[in-house]
Amino acid sequence: MSSRNSSGILPVEKGAGVTSFHVVGHLRRVLGVSRIGHGGTLDPEATGVLPILIGEATKLTPYLVDLDKEYVATVRLGVVTDTQDLSGAVRETRPVPEIDAAAIEAALARFVGVIFQVPPMYSALRRGGKRLYQLARDGLTVEREPRPVTVHAITLESVALPSFTMRVRCGKGTYVRTLAADLGEAFGCGGALERLVRTRVGPYRLESSAPWSEIQESRDGASLWARLLPPDSALGALPAVHLESGSTRPYVNGQTVACPPGPIGLVRVYGPGAELLGIGACRGGAVKPERILHADSSRPRVLPA
């Protein structure tokens, strides 16, 4: 696939020690595109799947943020840090109790479902126009209200005290660092995130993402363009609606148009030639534009395995 006028989603592996913003900036230069973003921040020391949105696909950012995610996380017990991971300053160390896999699994089970988390100070949330991490770096701590998040499943992968590794499948807004710290408190010894790998964002999996080494070594972006997926690869959970040819132009001009009866709620909207027009809200045989993707010529493809 060629370049500058193309829109789509490029799942990449973020390496350790760089920000998600750094990855976007690097790819902007390599691919020679101006409209580019990402579908969900990873902490600098974390690695794993980072969906990159290019061109018209950047309009889908809110929908990618909503996709569920999967992580493999290693928790170090017996240490408390100011960032809730091992990159931060150690505030306290405590002895680790004698616990086995059964005790850890029992604790993990208590964090499955809708739980409440207090967002960490070292996070990108805003307070009074400033990011919380900016306030934290200035030595300030502010009140944060607990937020509900959904943890779909946690499974124990391995135990090597004082550390253990777990696989977490969760919804948007979940801080795995905070989960590690809260688990440490559940054992009475404190805990911090030792290592984090994001293995999946929605349909995008780590094994089918562009490796970090390829991203670093790419000079003209040719191999990366070949990996570009169509914008609708992110929208497989939404039902599809195909418009008649006479409805296409009014729809992309922002008008509500008739659609086949059946779906209710958000849908993928296609023109008669399988051209993705965007996302609409469907009800009562009519679809209202929510996000319009102009001049997208992609065709539906098989989602990433």
Image: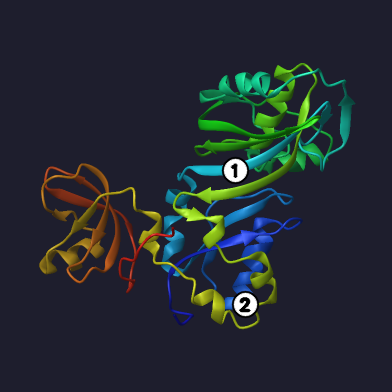
Indicate the position of residue 151 as horizontal and vertical percent values: 52, 31
Q: What's the residue type where badge 2 is placed?
A: Val
Closer mark to the observer between disc 2 and disc 1: 1
Indicate the position of residue 209 as horizontal and vertical percent values: 55, 62
Between disc 2 and disc 1, whose residue precedes? 2
**Residue 51 in sight from this viewpoint:** no
Give the position of the N terminus as an image quadrant.
bottom left
10 Å crowding of disc 1: few (<14), some (14-19), many (20+) = many
Give the position of the C terminus as an image quadrant.
bottom left
Q: As drawn, is 154 to the left or to the right of 278?
A: right
- Residue at 81% across, 30% down: 162
* Disc assigned to residue 71: 1
Q: As drawn, is 94 to the left or to the right of 155?
A: right
* Disc assigned to residue 87: none
- Residue at 87% across, 20% down: 95
Using the rendered view, name the quadrant where residue 178 is placed. Answer: top right
Q: What's the residue type where badge 1 is placed?
A: Tyr
Question: Is residue 175 placed above or below 18 in the rendered structure?
Answer: above
Q: For the residue labelled by badge 2, is the local secondary structure a helix, a strand or a loop? A: helix
Using the rendered view, name the quadrant where residue 223 is placed. Answer: bottom right
Q: For the residue labelled by badge 1, is the local secondary structure a helix, a strand or a loop? A: strand
- Marks 2 and 1 sit apart, C-alpha to C-alpha, by 28 Å
Nearest the viewer among 162 and 119 is 162
- Residue at 19% across, 51% down: 287
- Residue at 17% across, 68% down: 272
Identify the residue under disc 2: 30
Indicate the position of residue 246 as horizontal and vertical percent values: 11, 68
Q: As drawn, is 246 to the left or to the right of 175?
A: left
